[in-house]
Image (spheres, rainbow, N blue to C red):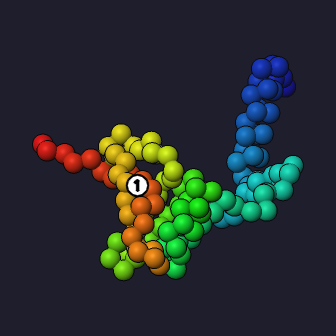
Amino acid sequence: MMTMTTSGKRIRHCLAAAALVLTSGSYGQAAQAPAADSPAPAYREQTPAPVRPEGLTCNELKSQLKAAGQMSILSGPKGAWGDTFYGPEVPRCQFYQMPQFTYVRTRDGLCGVGYICIDKLSFD
């Protein structure tokens, strides 16, 4: 009768364990992640909706911007898009942008609210 060496037994056990692990998984089902120790946060930070400046006075809009630090204000023809305004300080824009002081139309006329970041002109 043939006896196996210790290393032969280890190899046979490793191969059997590998075959068991590879074939014991559920086919076509995703594995479930282990439960987390703490629950997920109850809320996600959301960006506030853009503000329509036509419904506010200039002072109201400036005070909201000052309190928030930055705000998306609908501007352009008929409030077509929202620009991020920064106030009252000049913002640090991306390297390809520069700050520009901009006006919006409020209930009481044009209002110099604050700065937006615009793309720099490039003359290549």
In this picture, residue 107 sits left or right of residue 43: left
Point 50% across, 69% down: residue: 58
In this picture, residue 68 sits left or right of residue 91: right
In this rendering, is residue 39 above or below 57?
above
Name the residue nearer the viewer: 76 or 119.
76
Point 41% across, 44% down: residue: 93
In this picture, residue 97 sits left or right of residue 114: left
View extreme (left): residue: 124
Where's residue 108, x and y in %? 45, 76
The image quadrant where one finds the N terminus is top right
In this rendering, is residue 27 above or below 120?
below
View extreme (right): residue: 37
Name the residue nearer the viewer: 87 or 5.
87
Where's residue 114, x and y in %? 45, 56
The image quadrant where one finds the C terminus is top left
In this rendering, is residue 116 above or below 123?
below
Please identify the quarter of the rendering in which residue 105 is found: bottom left
Label 1: which secondary element: strand
Residue beneath disc 1? 116
Point 76% across, 33% down: residue: 14
Residue 72 visible in the snapshot = yes
Point 53% across, 75% down: residue: 56
In this picture, residue 37 sits left or right of residue 8: right
Where's residue 4, x and y in %? 81, 23
The amino acid at mark 1 is Ile
Please identify the quarter of the rendering in which residue 66 is found: bottom right
Where's residue 72, x and y in %? 50, 64
Name the residue nearer the viewer: 9 or 112.
112
Q: Residues within 10 Å of mark 1 (few under 14, many from 20)?
A: many
Instruction: Tally the numbered discs.
Output: 1
